[in-house]
C-alpha cells in the first residue's frame, strides 16, 4: 500500500489516502464523492519531525492498541488520558512517538479520526474510516471494539496461512538440498567405478551424470539464473495487467486457488460487515474493502459491484454475476439488503467462511508434505536406478564372459 496526498475540488479539502496504486486511490476518492485536483504519492510520514517511520506498529499490534483504547473508552476514561495510559504501557519508542503525535493532534482540537489519519501507517483507510464513523455516531468504544476484532481476525488468518506454508517449505528446501548433495557428490563417486568398463552407459545413468556435471561446473550460473528469474518476476508482477493475469491464473490452481479465494472472501465479508455496521455508506465500504483483498481479479470484481451499486442496483445481483462469490454469501447479502440486517448477516457469514478457510489451510498442510515426499521418493528411485543399471550390465558382461 502507498500513501497519496490529494487536494479536492469545492472546499479545497486536502488529505491523504492509502491505496495499492494511483488509479485505486482515484477510484476511492471518487466513491467518497470527492474530485481531486491533485493526487501524488508521498513518502512515509516523519514522527517528531525527524525520525522516519515505515511502520510503528504491525497489524497485530494495531489490533491490540485498538482493543486497549476501546476498553478504556468503554470504561468512561477520557480520550487523551486513555491514550497516555496506553502510551506508557511498555511501548517501543517508535510507538510512543506515534501516540504522542496523536495526543498532540487531539489536544489541538482534531478529531481522533483525523489524528490517526495524520499519523500515517499503520492507520490505513480502513481503520481511519472506522474511527471517524464511530466518533460521528457517538459509538467510538463500540466501533473500536469492532475494529480490534477485525484486525485480530485478519492477523490470525495471516498467521495460520504462514504457519501452513512453513512446514511444506522446509520440506521442499530439504528435498532440493538432498538432491543437490546426492547428484553432485555421491553419484559421481559411485559412477567412477564403472568408468571405462562399459562402452555406452544406460540412458538414466547418462542423464544423472549430465545433471551432476552441469551443477558441478555451472553452479554459479544456476544461482545467477535464479536471481534473474526472481528479479524478472518482481518486475512483471508490478505491471497492472501482468499482475491481473497472474492473479486470475492463481485462482484456477487446484487446492491453492480455492484457498486464496476463501481467504479473500472471508476478509471481504468481515471487513464489509464491520464497515456497514459502523455506519459507513455502502459505496465507501465497498471501496475500502476492495483494497484489502490482495488479489487483483477479486478486486476488479468488487469494483464492478461498486459500479453497479452506484447505478442503483443491489449488492447481491452483481456479486452473483461475477462468479467469484459463494452462492451462500450472495443469498445472505440479498436477505440482508431486504431486511436491513446486512451488517449482522455479513458478520455471521464471516465466521462461517473463516472456519472454512481454516479447514482449507489445514488441508493444505496435510496434502503438500506427502506430495513433496512422493516427489522425493521418485527422484531417489531414479537416482538408484541410474546407479544400479551400469552395475547390473557389468555383472551380466562378466557372467557372459
Image (tube, rainbow, N blue to C red):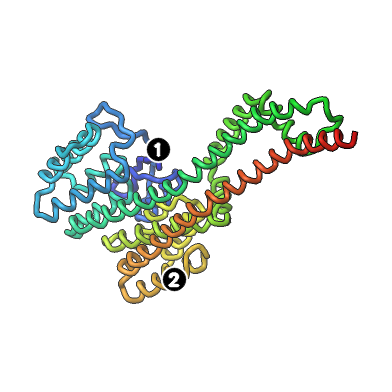
Instruction: State the residue lying farthest toward the right.
Output: 401
Place of residue 98 in the rendered image (x, y in percent of width and height, measured from the top left): 23, 36
The foreground one among 154 and 285 is 154
On screen, residue 151 above or below 384: below
Position in image of residue 213 (x %, y %): 71, 27
Q: Residues within 10 Å of mark 1 (few under 14, many from 20)?
A: some
Quadrant of the snapshot with the N terminus: top left
Circles 2, 1 touching at the beta carbon (< 8 Å) = no
**With 215 as the anchor, is 339 left or right in this view?**
left
Which of the image's four quarters has the C terminus?
A: top right
Q: SS class of the residue under badge 1?
A: strand
Q: Is residue 144 left or right of residue 177?
A: left
Under circle 2, the secondary element is helix
Of badges 2 and 1, the one in the foreground is: 2
- Where residue 392 sits: x, y (%)? 79, 38
Give residue 357's position: percent from left, percent from top. Answer: 43, 59
At a point 45% along the width and 55% down the height, the residue shown is: 361
Disc 1: which residue: 41
Return the residue nearer the eye: 253 or 190: 190
Decide if residue 312 is in sight here.
no
* Of pointers 2 and 1, the one earlier in the residue sequence: 1
Instruction: Determine whether 340 is above or below 20 in the image.
Output: below
Which residue is at 30% across, 46% downward?
Answer: 60
Residue ID at (37%, 54%): 288
Mark 2–mark 1 distance (CA, rounded to whole Å): 39 Å
The residue tagged 2 is: 328
- On residue 315, the disc is none
Residue found at x 31% / y 66%? 343
Q: Nearer the viewer, residue 218 or 299?
A: 218
Name the one closer to the observer, 222 or 182.
182
Amino acid at each position: 500500500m502507498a500513501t497519496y496526498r490529494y487536494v479536492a475540488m469545492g472546499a479545497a479539502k486536502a488529505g491523504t489516502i492509502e491505496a495499492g496504486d494511483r488509479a485505486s486511490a482515484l477510484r476511492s476518492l471518487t466513491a467518497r464523492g470527492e474530485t481531486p485536483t491533485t493526487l501524488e504519492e508521498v513518502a512515509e510520514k516523519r514522527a517528531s519531525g525527524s525520525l522516519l517511520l515505515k511502520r510503528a506498529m504491525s497489524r497485530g499490534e494495531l489490533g491490540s492498541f485498538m482493543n486497549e483504547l476501546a476498553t478504556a473508552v468503554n470504561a468512561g476514561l477520557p480520550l487523551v488520558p486513555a491514550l497516555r495510559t496506553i502510551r506508557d504501557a511498555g511501548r517501543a519508542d517508535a510507538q510512543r512517538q506515534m501516540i504522542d503525535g496523536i495526543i498532540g493532534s487531539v489536544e489541538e482540537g482534531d478529531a481522533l479520526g483525523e489524528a490517526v489519519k495524520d499519523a500515517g501507517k499503520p492507520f490505513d483507510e480502513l481503520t481511519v474510516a472506522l474511527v471517524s464513523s464511530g466518533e460521528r455516531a457517538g459509538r467510538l468504544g463500540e466501533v473500536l471494539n469492532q475494529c480490534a476484532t477485525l484486525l485480530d481476525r485478519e492477523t490470525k488468518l495471516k498467521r495460520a496461512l504462514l504457519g501452513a506454508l512453513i512446514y511444506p517449505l522446509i520440506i521442499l528446501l530439504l528435498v532440493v538440498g538432498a538432491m543437490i548433495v546426492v547428484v553432485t557428490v555421491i553419484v559421481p563417486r559411485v559412477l567412477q567405478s564403472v568408468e571405462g568398463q562399459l562402452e555406452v552407459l544406460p540412458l538414466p545413468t547418462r542423464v544423472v551424470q549430465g545433471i551432476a556435471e552441469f551443477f558441478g561446473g555451472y553452479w554459479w550460473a544456476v544461482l545467477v539464473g535464479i536471481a534473474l528469474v526472481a528479479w524478472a518476476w518482481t518486475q512483471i508482477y508490478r505491471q497492472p495487467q501482468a499482475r491481473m493475469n497472474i492473479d486470475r491464473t492463481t485462482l484456477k490452481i487446484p487446492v491453492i486457488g480455492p484457498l486464496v479465494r476463501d481467504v479473500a472472501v472471508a476478509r471481504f465479508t468481515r471487513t464489509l460487515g464491520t464497515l456497514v455496521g459502523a455506519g459507513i455508506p455502502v459505496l465507501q465500504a465497498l471501496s475500502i474493502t476492495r483494497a484489502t483483498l490482495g488479489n487483483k481479479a477479486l478486486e476488479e470484481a468488487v469494483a464492478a459491484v461498486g459500479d453497479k451499486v452506484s447505478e442503483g442496483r443491489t449488492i447481491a445481483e452483481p456479486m452473483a454475476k461475477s462468479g467469484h462469490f459463494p452462492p451462500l454469501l450472495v443469498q445472505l447479502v440479498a436477505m440482508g439488503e431486504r431486511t436491513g440486517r446486512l451488517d449482522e448477516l455479513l458478520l455471521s457469514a464471516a465466521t462461517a467462511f473463516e472456519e472454512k478457510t481454516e479447514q482449507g489451510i489445514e488441508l493444505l498442510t496435510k496434502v503438500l508434505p506427502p506430495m513433496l515426499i512422493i516427489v522425493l521418493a521418485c527422484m531417489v528411485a531414479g537416482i538408484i536406478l541410474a546407479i544400479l543399471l551400469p552395475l547390473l550390465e557389468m555383472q551380466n558382461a562378466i557372467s557372459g564372459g
